[in-house]
Image (tube, rainbow, N blue to C red):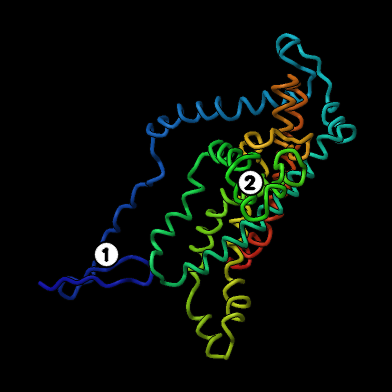
Amino acid sequence: MNLHVTPNTDGADMATVGNEARPVAAAPPAKAVGNLGPARFFAVPGQIVSLVVLVMPLLVALYMSFTDWSPTRGSLAEAYFVGLENYYELLVYDSRFIEAVIRTVLLSAVCLMLEFTLGLGLAVLFLREFRGKAVLFSAFLTPMMILPVVVGYTFWMLFQSNGPINQVIALIAGPGAMPEWFRSAPFAVATVIITEVWHWTPLFFLILLSGLNAVPENPVRAAVILGASPRQVFWQVVLPMLKPVIIVAFVIRAMEVIKLFDEVFMLTRGGPGSATETISLYIYKLAFNDFQLAYGAAAAFLVLIGTLVIINLMLLPVRDQLLEARR
């Protein structure tokens, strides 16, 4: 007996037995995989923990920012509701808050540009083969693995009046050339920038090196065949293809450097005066030195809103590029 199956035009298969064609029953539909049944209830405890740990404190802090509560005034439930008064005072009357925001933005911009420049240079250098490359690669990545508090304390020791850096300066230029790093505003700012750049340049280096290794070879070869110089290939072919990677690297570091606290706290405590007082350090002083927790919460939410705006603006070119690619 000859048996073979032929597809029918209406979607049903036909089995031919001898000279007679008979319909073949369709296979039963597969069960939906997404219906997990009782198993989905195992995720409920984790969701409850996330709600309690993450969402509830945020909501409490948001409510607190609309009150005049302080730990010395009883419980939060008894606090007087002041509405937007804390936010208005911060934006209109608190010049120290505005200065801290501007100072943080400027410090962030300088640190990000230096870290990007050094990280890109190191990434281009490590595209070549040279002796000791693996050892140097591990050495360059080591700083970002150290705790920020440890980095801040280490550089505080290095920049002391009789520390190693001043000893080297004295050997080169004489004892009279040794600066007081923490008593002068420009030198104090320089110590913060040097510390931050040393600590986080490896992150830019790692991200950009990964991006350079992922660049396709065909556009580069085409540019070389057309007579482009190595400099033209890098600036006009390679670097534009790295645009998404560069933006992601800037976004990751911007979210961290805006919260700059540990290194500044260990190095200068915001001094001399308020020359190195970042917005995180200012909010810390409001909350834990002056016990103005409601006022500090309002400042923190203003910083959160500003950070979200900045990050979304930075991601805008990448977002447009992804939307165009989907079309």
Upstream in sequence: badge 1 or badge 2: 1
Quadrant hosting residue 151: top right
User: Considering only vertical position in the picture, is 94 above or below 23?
Assistant: above
User: Considering only vertical position in the picture, is 288 above or below 320?
Assistant: above
Q: In the image, is 38 to the left or to the right of 65?
A: left
Question: In the rendered view of the protein, which quadrant contains the N terminus?
Answer: bottom left
x then y, percent, for residue 49? 50, 26
Q: Residue furthest left?
A: 1
- In the rendering, which numbered label is found on residue 23? 1
Mark 1 touching mark 2, by CB under 8 A? no
Question: In the rendered view of the protein, which quadrant contains the C terminus?
Answer: bottom right
**Which mark lies nearer to you, 1 or 2?**
2
x then y, percent, for residue 192? 67, 44
- In the rendering, which numbered label is found on residue 203? none
Query: Is residue 264 or residue 127 the one in the foreground?
Result: 264
Q: In the image, is 309 to the left or to the right of 215?
A: right
Quadrant hosting residue 308: top right
Query: Is residue 184 or residue 118 the one in the foreground?
Result: 184
Give amino acid for label 2: Asn
The residue to which callout 2 is attached is 166
Give amino acid for label 1: Pro
User: Considering only vertical position in the picture, is 42 above or below 112?
Assistant: above
